[in-house]
Image (cartoon, grey):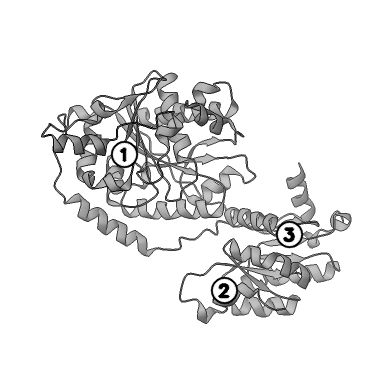
Amino acid sequence: MELCQTQDTIPGSKEGHDQVSPTAVALVLPKADFVAVCDDLVAAGYEPLPAENADDLERLLDSRDDIRVAIVNGEGEIDQTLELYGVLHDRGRKIPALILVSPLTFGRMSLGGRSDSTDEYFSRPFTAQSLRFRIDAMLIRSGEVPVEEPVVVEEIVAAHATAATAPVTPPAQPLEEAQRGRLVVVFNPKGGVGKTTVSVNLGAALQVRKHLRVLLIDCDAVTGHVAPSLGMPQLRTLAEAWLWDHQNGKEEETIAHVAVPHSVGLDVLVLAGTPFHTEVLEPARVAAAIAASRAFYDFVILDLHPDFGPLNLAIFDLADRIIVPVTPDVPCIRAAVQFREVATALEMRDRLVLVINRANSGIAPSKVERTVGIPALAKIRSAGKLFYQASDAGVPAVERAPGAKAVGDINRLADRLLAALDAGEHVGLVQQRRGGIAGSLRALFGRFTD
């Protein structure tokens, strides 16, 4: 069986792995099935490797040490399936199997009591996309979500050290007065995970339910959506205010002066509406202004752009907590793991907490939490069109639909954040649980159908 046509640029052996390569997946499937799913798996970031039988699979595993999942044809004789399964676990191997079985024969299969709790099954009809999502889930469950670019940690730490020596503009308020408010950052180095949704609705919950003074700052000059989500698309930005002050010889305006109140009560500030205005937003100057704004608010919540630039690094230093929204998919989990490594190097890992967004999408939140290695402060379930409809109406979902279950999740996030900050707690790291071959495929079937 031949590899996919798009596979020619992907390293094919141990010797060829001197650069970062896609996650390798062994496929012991009929040729027609392999061809049907191969290109889609490649496009999703996987490297499908074909094998025709147990001997072929054994040779493949001997030649590659980066295979993380195997898709195995279990529609034939049970002895053949057991032989394939044995190859995946012989000689110290522990490779999870996604097994293709016939629904009619599934109830009679037990793999001799050898099925691993990380294994799964599927049956016909299936699609390449469905297999891709199943592989994603298995990698998350097994903790196989590597940091692909460890060198970035050293670069970020060096940039942080450089930024720390830059001159700082004196804040508008004495530093002692600026310590009142809590500063909460919402950040993930991957976009599209719900940072703005969490920022807007957490801020509104603290303002509306807890009657606290809240400042919500959109620090994303590239893809920021805070103001449009709140029906405030034409706000004067901090960059515009400072440019006007400079051009007219005026004293620099404070953040509290530039921020605009929303109808629900919280104040909203946008740093810049375009990347072309960010030259005035020198990181140390912005960080000092943000620190000064804490004299006017109980909470300052910052929605950051997904990067490790100097501005974000300066803001990280101010944060009392850094909320990391995570959705249950491999790219997002991988980004969160990378951020954990960066935070460890910058000695701020104890300020990180997860918020698992779309938590009811099929992957257990506890497994996401364990894989990332950061404690989860709350889970937010999928809410259909609720958040989109609230954004279209220019109000937070906590105001538009206070009785919705997802809004209840946001309120619990606010409660737990307050409790943790009031107690001065640093939640302990999640302990890894040991896996092991246990149970049977019949028991596995029970878990997925309950």
Query: Which secondary structure, mark 3?
Result: loop
| Furthest residue toward left | 249
With respect to residue 76, does 327 lie above or below?
above
Please identify the residue farthest to the right as the structure is shown: 104
Disc 3: CA contacts within 10 A as few (<14), some (14-19) or many (>=20): many
Picture quarter with the N terminus: bottom right
Ranked by sequence position, the earlier of labels 2 and 1 is 2
Identify the residue at image location x=32%, y=47%.
275
Mark 2 — residue?
A: 65
Identity of the amino acid at label 2?
A: Asp
Identify residue for label 1. Answer: 319
Give the spatial CA distance, label 2 vs label 1. Answer: 41 Å
Amino acid type for the residue under numbered disc 1: Ala
Quadrant position of residue 297: top left
Q: Position of residue 278 (x, y in %)?
A: 27, 46
Q: From this view, report whether residue 312 is shown above or below residue 144.
A: above
The crowd level at tag 1 (other Cα within 10 Å; few <14, some 14-19, many 20+) is many
Tell me where residue 409 appears, x and y as whole percent.
Answer: 54, 30
* Secondary structure found at label 1: loop
The answer to whether any part of residue 30 appears in the image is: no
In this figure, what is the number of numbered marks? 3
Residue that label 3 marks: 115
Q: Horizontal placement of 417 versus 106: left or right?
A: left
Towards the viewer: 337 or 111: 337
Q: Quadrant of residue 104?
A: bottom right
| Residue at 47 percent of width and 49 percent of height | 373
- Give whichever of 115, 174 is nearer the camera: 174
CA gap, disc 3 and disc 1:
46 Å
Q: Are marks 3 and 1 in contact (CB under 8 Å)?
A: no
Q: Which mark is residue 4?
A: none
- Measured Cα–Cα span from mark 2 to mark 3: 22 Å
Mark in the foreground, 2 or 1: 1
